Image (cartoon, helix red, strand yellow):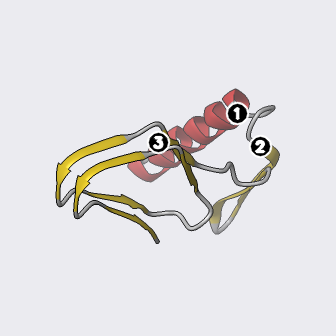
């Protein structure tokens, strides 16, 4: 077997294993097609989980907490001190 076939087979096997593990909880549908162009995997997930940021305590001065998701729920965080910042992008 050539190296390309071995690499494609390993990748396909890894995708199938991951799809099997997450089939009920995260995946809505999973389609794997093999053709002349190569492998094509279509993965559709359920609604994106909401990230919750809570229970954090910032103490001191000039601390910054940044959240990189716009759909995050930020609540119950204690900012104790001077010049504390909480940024949600």
Q: Nearer the viewer, mark 3 or mark 1?
A: 1
Q: Nearer the viewer, mark 3 or mark 2?
A: 2
Q: Which residue is mark 1?
A: 22
The residue positioned 55% from the left and 49% from the top of the image is 75
Disc marking residue 27: 2
Nearer to me, 1 or 56: 56
> Residue 6, position in %: x, y?
47, 42
The residue positioned 81% from the left and 32% from the top of the image is 24
* Marked residue nearer the N-terminal end (3 or 1): 3
Q: Which residue is mark 3?
A: 6
Q: Horizontally, is 58 left or right of 11 in the view?
A: left
The residue positioned 51% from the left and 41% from the top of the image is 54
Disc 3, disc 1: CB below 8 Å?
Answer: no
Q: Secondary structure at mark 1?
A: loop
> Can you tell which quarter of the image residue 26 is in?
top right
The residue positioned 27% from the left and 60% from the top of the image is 84
Q: Secondary structure at mark 3?
A: helix
> Residue 80, position in %: x, y?
29, 47
* Marked residue nearer the N-terminal end (3 or 2): 3
Q: Find the distance from the CA under tag 1 to the CA under tag 2.
A: 6 Å
Q: Find the distance from the CA under tag 3 to the CA under tag 2.
A: 27 Å
Vertical comparison of 72 with 14: above or below: below
> Residue 81, position in %: x, y?
23, 51
């Amino acid at each position: 077997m050539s190296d390309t076939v071995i690499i494609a087979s390993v990748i396909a096997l890894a995708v199938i294993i991951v799809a099997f593990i997450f089939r009920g909880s995260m995946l809505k549908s999973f389609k794997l097609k093999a053709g002349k162009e190569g492998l094509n995997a279509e993965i559709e997930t359920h609604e994106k989980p909401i990230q919750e940021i809570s229970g954090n305590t910032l103490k001191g001065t000039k601390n910054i907490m940044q959240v990189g998701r716009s759909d995050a729920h930020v609540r119950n965080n204690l900012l104790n001190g001077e010049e504390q910042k909480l940024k949600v992008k």
